[in-house]
Image: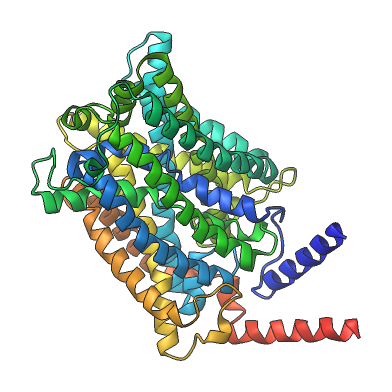
Amino acid sequence: MVNRDKREQLQEDKKYLNQFGYAQELLRDMGGFSNFAISFSIISILTGAVSLYGHGLLYGGPGMMGFGWPLVALFVLLVAASMAELASAIPTAGALYHWAAILANKRWGWYTAWINLIGQIGIVAGIDYSFALFADPLLAGAFGYTSTDTTVLIVFGVTLLLHGILNHVGIRLVARLNDFSAWYHIAVVAILVVSLAFFTKNGLQPLEYLFQVGQTFSDKPYAVAFLIGLLQAQWTFTGYDASAHTIEETVNPRVRAPWGIYSSVAFSFIFGFIMLSFVTLSIEDAAAAANSDNAFIFVISQALGGTFGAIVLWLVTFAMFFCGLSSVTSFSRMMYAFSRDKGMPWSRHWAEISRKYRTPAKAIWLVVILSFALAFVDYILKRVNPDTSYTTLAFLTGVSVVGLYVAYGIPLFLKLRAEAQGRFLPKHLGPWNLGSWSKPINVISIIWIVFISLMMIIPPNQNAGYALAAMMLLLVIMDLAYYKDHFEGPEAALNTSLEEIMQKESQYAGEDHARTL
């Protein structure tokens, strides 16, 4: 009975995808938890909140954890809800790119796809570089070598290579690792919280310490410093569009993928706040922690010390490995969907599916190469100018936050415009929708995206702004020189309109009803 129900659901999912002009090429085998798990693993509170803990503490002090984290989470929940609504209405692997193309036109879709790709390069590089920043000092201590920028880069490259291999092998293995990753994250947070609650050497700070504002260890006025420090939380809450990029591999995607997007943010907020609270309350010397090479390692080592502290840090570091694995999966699916529509140079290669593993193998390896290249270019620039004050991680995360959130915001803006023009109506929504709250939530989400994007590129992280500006200039040149006249657009926008989708859905429903009679 269960197998029959699943077969019927798979047939319905395939039929709905066909209405958008696409064949079912990817293996549709992910359940609701697996779809949630990939976004939860990419958000990874044990990556973003941990690797940028020193950034948040340096600029916003303890109050960054007590006030900054919930503030960002509140607005991100609104953005996630808005995106989930569109995923339910237009369930294709192209996600943001297809939403923009259908709601406006192919050029809006093309720019959305490339901006999303820029953000995806930044997030894959940022996550795996975070892993390397934690793993390399721990490995150096175990094997007796000195951790340097070069050794970190080597660990980073090896990590990307492993993630490429695992993603190449197949979605079933990655889905199972993602399922494990979600539970692993929760278990490690529990271990960390219990350890700090009961075994912190000098006890915990009073609760009000968590909400202490006005203290910054930077040279900025506190109000400005607090806004700069929001990068810690904002970068953590990225990548949840992964549930939409794997939507063609998810069973019952119009319900499960939207819940995957929204619930991954909600659970990350809750577990992340609990974890950050106990880490912050275990601080002995905030100034020393903020000015150390790695504030999180400093705080945990001071609080737990010795072997026990090292074990906890290794557990956290492995969580970052799983996070990077999921991010390569998401990025490669987005690249596959875009290449399927011939939106990239040499698209036929990146849209090619491995016959043996049924994964976009070449797209996976291009993801690995581009992500390494972004960090390697930064590595070379820092060799040329060793006195630069910004960190590689801040650069990578700044690029990813702005790239991803601008890509998130474009289809939300286009949806509002299509509604105002009478082209997007309530009947076009999927089963997961916000009802009468849709428009106000969309508007607030767009305002937040504009605000936070500006905050992510102000000094001292202006280099991320320069990099993004250069990339946008390159996109305009590519568009005007070739793609304006040669990019046909996604099949979803070429061969269908929202009205045609609705007509096809009604037609299929009528045929199914006739067969049952």
Q: Identify the colour scheme used.
A: rainbow
Residue with the most extreme top position: 144
**Residue 7: percent from the left, percent from the top?**
82, 62
Q: Nearer the viewer, residue 216 or 447?
A: 216
Drawn side of residue 117 relative to residue 501, left or right: left
Image: 55 above or below 496? above
Q: Can the viewer see residue 240?
A: yes
Q: Provide residue 235's location: percent of width, then percent of height.
A: 35, 49
- Count of numbered tags: 0
- For the residue pair 218 and 94, the one nearer the viewer reads as 218
Residue 392 seen in the figure: no
Residue for point 68% across, 42% down: 170
Quarter of the image for the C terminus: give it: bottom right
Who's the residue at 82% across and 63% down the image? Answer: 5
Quarter location, residue 117: bottom left
Q: Quadrant of residue 73?
A: bottom left
Could you tell me which residue is drawn at 30 percent across and 46 percent down?
232
Instruction: Pick out the residue farthest to the right.
Output: 517
